[in-house]
Image: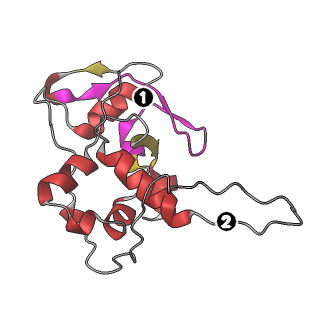
Amino acid sequence: MKSARKSYFEIALSAALLSLLVIPPSHGVTTQPKVPTKPVIALKIAPDQLTGYVRSKFKHWIDADHDGCNTRNEVLIAEAIVKPIVATHCTLTGGKWISPYDGVSYTDTGELDIDHLVPLSEAWRSGAWKWTALQRQNYANDLTDPRALVAVTAGENRAKGD
């Protein structure tokens, strides 16, 4: 049974998707849409917070579960198509990864970045500016949803920016 509590990723993803919501013109559709008698949910629409974002306000790559592997390595271990050997201090060797951004395979973890699918800057603009430092840290290291963090080609990730 899924917890009723949303992960930080789910909250940020919802905010990001709402900010992209565009209703296209009807293009000649003549039927009237059904309008619910009661609102399904009440959304508070607020302007984005466009100032104050600094990446360092989102402490990331921590070892939340104290197993010796930080969040970055936890993602690499989880997404490996050939599981790496995990040595002392969570040094990873022998694994293989395929970046979903370009389909390129890698065996060197140094060629991979861990991307926040909802960028930290978007989380900030959509409300993380009101979060505590701990809440921002939890978001930046959210392993509760496998879509939140993804191992990708470093160059592709950096080329797209935040």
Q: Decide whether residue 92 is among the magenta residues.
A: yes
Color theme of the render: secondary structure
Q: Residue furthest front?
A: 37
In the rendered image, which quarter contains the C terminus? bottom left
Callout 1 secondary element: helix
Q: Which residues are magenta?
A: 90-113
Report the label total: 2
**In x, y percent, where is residue 85?**
30, 18
Nearer to me, 69 or 124: 124
Disc 1 packing (10 Å; few <14; some 14–19; many ≥20): some
Q: Residue furthest left?
A: 66
Amino acid of disc 2: Ile
Q: Which residue is mark 2?
A: 23
Nearer to me, 62 or 13: 13
Q: Residue at x 45, y 19 (%)?
A: 82
Amino acid of disc 1: Glu
Nearer to me, 11 or 66: 11
**Which quadrant holds residue 132?**
bottom left
Q: Is residue 95 above or below residue 99?
A: above
**In x, y percent, where is residue 97?**
47, 30
Callout 2 secondary element: loop
Give residue 79's mark. Answer: 1
Left or right: residue 121 versus residue 28 is: left
Visible in this render: residue 57? yes
Nearer to me, 39 or 50: 39
